[in-house]
Image: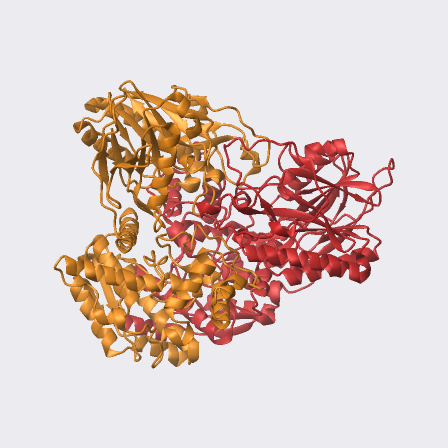
Chain colours: A orange, B red
Amino acid sequence: MAAAQIDTCVGDLAGNASAVLEWTRRAAQTGAQLVVFPEMTLTGYPIEDLALRASFRRAAQETLEQLARDLDADGLGDVAVLVGSVGERASRRRRPGADDAAEAPRESGTEPLPDSELVGDVVAGRPEARDAVRPTNDAVLLRGGRVETRYSKHHLPNYGVFDEFRIFAPGDEICVIDVADRRIGVVICEDIWQDGGPVSLMDEREVAALVVLNGSPFEEGKGHVRAELAARRAAEVDAPVVYVNLVGGQDDLVFDGGSFVVDRDGSLLASAPQLVEHLLVWDLADEGEPAQRGPVAPPLHPDEETYRAVVAGLRAYVRKNGFRTVTLGLSGGIDSALTAVIAADAIGGENVVGVSMPSAFSSDHSKDDAADLAQRIGADYRVQPIAGMVEAFQRELALEGVAEENLQARVRGMILMAISNREGHLVIAPGNKSELATGYATIYDAGSIGGYAPLKDVDKSRVWALARWRNDHAIDRGEIPPIPESSITKPPSAELRPGQLDQDSLPPYALLDEVLDAYVEHAEGRAELLARGFDPAVVDRVLQLVDRAEWKRRQYPPGPKVTALAFGRDRRLPITSRWREP
Amino acid sequence: MAAAQIDTCVGDLAGNASAVLEWTRRAAQTGAQLVVFPEMTLTGYPIEDLALRASFRRAAQETLEQLARDLDADGLGDVAVLVGSVGERASRRRRPGADDAAEAPRESGTEPLPDSELVGDVVAGRPEARDAVRPTNDAVLLRGGRVETRYSKHHLPNYGVFDEFRIFAPGDEICVIDVADRRIGVVICEDIWQDGGPVSLMDEREVAALVVLNGSPFEEGKGHVRAELAARRAAEVDAPVVYVNLVGGQDDLVFDGGSFVVDRDGSLLASAPQLVEHLLVWDLADEGEPAQRGPVAPPLHPDEETYRAVVAGLRAYVRKNGFRTVTLGLSGGIDSALTAVIAADAIGGENVVGVSMPSAFSSDHSKDDAADLAQRIGADYRVQPIAGMVEAFQRELALEGVAEENLQARVRGMILMAISNREGHLVIAPGNKSELATGYATIYDAGSIGGYAPLKDVDKSRVWALARWRNDHAIDRGEIPPIPESSITKPPSAELRPGQLDQDSLPPYALLDEVLDAYVEHAEGRAELLARGFDPAVVDRVLQLVDRAEWKRRQYPPGPKVTALAFGRDRRLPITSRWREP
């Protein structure tokens, strides 16, 4: 069988269907009789409230049926093709806490949805629609030119970035398909993250393998969690588990692929590389024979994994939104340097427009570093001094102090937006997670405006680590390190007044990032932080900054999620709150 | 008994507790033996992911216990006080689709949570914490100096703006309390929106009344839905239902109060006015006697209701975030005129700083109208021409076309941010729902920057209607209409080039808003819109604009939700999507 670890785009039904056709062709050439695609293949993932639109569901269903016919017409009718798509269920909304119990799961039927169910309309928030037709998150078997079987995901995650229980109706049947006289169990993503449920019933069906369609977002160090979980399910069904994951970026999520096959004893039988499209081919052993081994991709270093995830997120955002080029301000500092290198790796240095916007407070080394960086990555480099525009504002407004500092920063933001308007580049924002968390940034400056913030979920300590990894990686390959050493080593400064340093306003970043990690990622309170020995003055300063920055954070453009809790969809906090840690 | 329709603030445990004490005093003076407060009184509502922070839950519990003692010390120990707060439950996460069935609800115990349950830590998104202690949405009876009974909400809404199933564990007990030898049933908000569940079991308990603690956000025309629903439950339990709702704004939600008592035959027994704090006192009839009638507040005209909701939302956002004053650009157009009047009604005209920022393309009537408006509402009025700053940019960048138009618009945004920085005003954004939906605005201009957008969920047609209502309201009261007539009647224009009119780029607003309502609020597809007779060219234009504007919409500051589906928390759509209506 083959696991097709592909990159889909939300809403691109035709494009995603073409990809299924193309990858099925390749898989068939290897002799595969079953090709498994990632979760919600046809629709893209996550589709969020698009699922609530009846016209979208109808179009997805039509595309699915056409795809089945196209596969058959292409001579692939004998191949079993498992894809994900949106389905429908004419059911009452399952209400938490109600006794919506517990019909025993039934084996999945083999009939496609009758046309009569492909009507109706559901809008979140409209009480009158709560009992109407609801969408489902389905795995669909295409074979012989038709939709043969359909399975609806049982477990709908509703935490972190996931809103599935909000959108989908859960399924209550289990799905076992026959391929070449072997029984293959089918489940979707969260179904294996919960004890009980469909997997616990598979062992009675004596499946030869369990395949799992996934849309599992990247998160630092998540790989081994997936593998352990899959191994547990493999032991449960006493058969190998084939875990097929989505790859590529979608808005603020990055899917890292890394599909794999794990045996019931926990041993890794095969795996695909992370963060690239890949066809993982693995043969199911004959009955009674020991499990076959396939190719195994070497694991990535944690910094490389995160770096490549950030690159993938930016590349997807640029391309899937129809841009070819990006622009950003180059200050000579580490954030904009790393962001520019990430952009160059994502879409090519020649598609990056770096703009140096020096002021009276910009040091010579900053300007030199910016020019040096641009030259190393082959970017289109421009210098646009801001003095004339700042003076024009100052003649009218005579600002002082922080207002004057912010003015300079916002003039830079305006210049980038103007260049974007004129030339059609996507503006990208180099702001990092530490400054975003603490609000240590001018809102609407060059670090926070634009369409996408590649470092939004990368704290400052990690920014330096990724920069060093990237330079070392270049050296390992005999290339010139893209980031000037002095951008990495100099003390960070916004250069908005003479001698200004970040460390005048913030605790040292190593300390700040440690407190942020405890407070934000691990929800530790002030008491716990003090008990761990942090300086009370530092703790109070950081908590005050974080608690006040919520509104600013909401103004940031989206950025990739790479840690357990990124700012964005997976963190929902009131903007207006008087809560202060006691 | 008394329904205390009060305004709380999220996270302000001490302030909310003080309010409970103060309003209980007032209620006791009327002889009330039971005082019922809105949902999540102590914590504010909605607290979103604050609920997942153990330190917050601990502090809420300590505040609750202290409040019980303070009430007693104040001589109010005999009064039964029902408040909402966050609780905890050491339970497995309820999994949708799993057989989490259906222990029969039990009558609520009378013991407070043991201290041992007030530990633990839950972070959304961390699989390892999924089975840990989880927060609950509770109604708590304070009496005799202690926490006497606690009820956890069963039905946790998970649609529209509601994320409760994501955050809270559902309760499975029912709650009937004794007050002056009468049995009173207690439930919370969504519990009455679902058939079955706790209310269906109340009739066996022969309650004399059912009280409902609510945090029900304002939505046009929602009042009668609440009343009909409550009447259904009153018939079910064969006793009056006392519906107590929160009032005031919290971020993008506005709670409109309008608490009421409805009898089992559907007749309204008493009601509080909307959108103001109020103590509704109503006497429970003796057993066997006909239901008592209390004061009934006259209903508001729909335009007045929406206008007051928008005012309440802005007032709360300004005050709860610690601001006293606001600033905005005054163009002479209807959006900024209405926004300024709303601000004057919310916080006083003397706290509104209106800035006229004329360019070469600004008409004389625009400047006159802006000055006239500012004078009528008593605003601090300033004129800041933009020519000098625009020229400074143009000398360097030589922009043309849309880029040049956007430059002018963004210079205005920068001026407001600079004035805000210098003087400490909150910048408010006059952009309306129609322009937000279609992306017909310059991102980071004076219409879209800042902290709060009062008209974010008010479409252009409604902007005119609210302006007319506000002027008529002034005339009715013998006051000068605040909005210059020509701001209402002149054709809308961004005035960014000579002779520019909105209608050159958009369909007429009456038509546009009708298509938007069908497409956005009612999720109709292209086919349905065409079937209803809309011009295909108009439909395609509007759909294209809306589908492309998602990223721009996310850059808008929060604004009040006044329709079924506002842009913001209750609409979750992918930013990057290739989906186009077929």
Residue A388 lies, in percent from the top left, at 30, 77
Please, is residue A565 above or below residue A56 in the view? below
In the image, A47 versus B44, the foreground residue is B44
Residue A465 lies, in percent from the top left, at 29, 62
Residue A412 lies, in percent from the top left, at 32, 69
Please, is residue A246 above or below residue B562 in the view? above
Q: Quadrant of the C terminus of chain B?
A: top left
Q: On the rendered structure, is B228 left or right of A42?
A: right
Residue B556 lies in quadrant? bottom left
Q: On the rendered structure, is A381 left or right of B89?
A: left
Q: Is residue A59 visible?
A: no
Please, is residue B269 above or below residue A495 in the view? above
Q: On the rendered structure, is B263 left or right of A330?
A: right
In the image, B401 versus A269, the foreground residue is A269
Please report the residue visible at 40 percent of the width from the left and 38 percent of the height from the top.
Answer: B535
Tally of numbered discs: 0
Residue A453 lies, in percent from the top left, at 34, 58
In the image, A266 versus A51, the foreground residue is A266
